[in-house]
Image (spheres, helix red, strand yellow):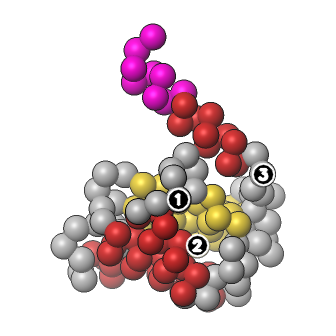
């Protein structure tokens, strides 16, 4: 089998394992994180209605002006604070953290810790 295909199947298996136990509701939405090589994205999702309640990314104009690069831990921390602010504006204080198939390490951890400092409870 092709190496790329095997890697992708392992990622999908990990993602389904994590997502099997997490469900976002209106009271406790799912904080989903996506990491690319150049940027990081976070969304608050209500899975029952299928609606994104808030979003933040390192591609947003207010985040980009203070950062030279969007794919490092500093950018992830800024995105974590932005998603926490957006959650507070929507009256959300508790979330279910969905790291996807990524390890809780590096940029994912920086985003989560910044969101906690911003007032979100996991």
Mark closer to the chain start, 2 or 3: 3
| Left or right: residue 77 compared with residue 13 | left
User: Which dot, 1 or 2, sits closer to the camera?
Assistant: 1
In percent of the image, x 58 and y 50: which residue is there?
100
Q: Is residue 39 above or below residue 66?
A: above
Seen as rendered, the residue at the extreme front is 105
Q: Secondary structure at mark 1?
A: loop
Q: Secondary structure at mark 3?
A: loop
Identify which residue, 53 or 57, lies in the foreground.
57
Q: CA distance from mark 3 to mark 1?
A: 16 Å
Find the magenta span and give its range.
Answer: 1-9
Given this view, does label 3 or label 1 mark the residue nearer the observer?
1
Q: Main secondary structure of the magenta part?
A: helix
Instruction: Give the residue number, with chain letter if any, for mark 2.
Output: 54
Q: Residue at x 22, y 67 (%)?
A: 69
Residue extending farthest to the top is 1
Mark nearer the N terminus (3 vs 1): 3
Q: Are marks 1 and 2 in contact (CB under 8 Å)?
A: no
Q: Position of residue 86 (x, y in %)?
A: 56, 82
Q: Residue at x 51, y 50 (%)?
A: 102
Tell me if 12 is positioned left or right of 62 in this view: right
Label 2 sits on a secondary structure element that is strand
Q: Viewer-proximal residue, 89 or 73?
A: 73
Considering only vertical position in the picture, is 86 above or below 10? below
Quickly name the residue at label 1: 104
- x then y, percent, for residue 98: 63, 58
4 falls in the magenta region:
yes
**Magenta segment includes 67:** no
Tell me, for residue 21, which label it has, or none. 3
């Amino acid at each position: 089998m092709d190496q790329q295909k095997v890697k992708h199947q392992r990622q999908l298996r990990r993602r389904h394992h994590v997502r099997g136990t997490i469900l976002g509701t209106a009271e406790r939405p799912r904080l989903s994180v996506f990491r690319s090589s150049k940027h990081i994205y976070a969304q608050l999702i209500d899975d029952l209605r299928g609606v994104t309640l808030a979003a933040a990314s390192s591609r947003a104009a207010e985040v980009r002006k203070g950062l030279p690069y969007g794919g490092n831990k500093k950018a992830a921390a800024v995105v974590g604070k932005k998603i926490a602010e957006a959650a507070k504006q929507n009256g959300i204080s508790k979330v279910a953290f969905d790291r996807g198939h990524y390890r809780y390490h590096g940029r994912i951890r920086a985003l989560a810790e910044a969101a906690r400092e911003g007032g979100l409870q996991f």
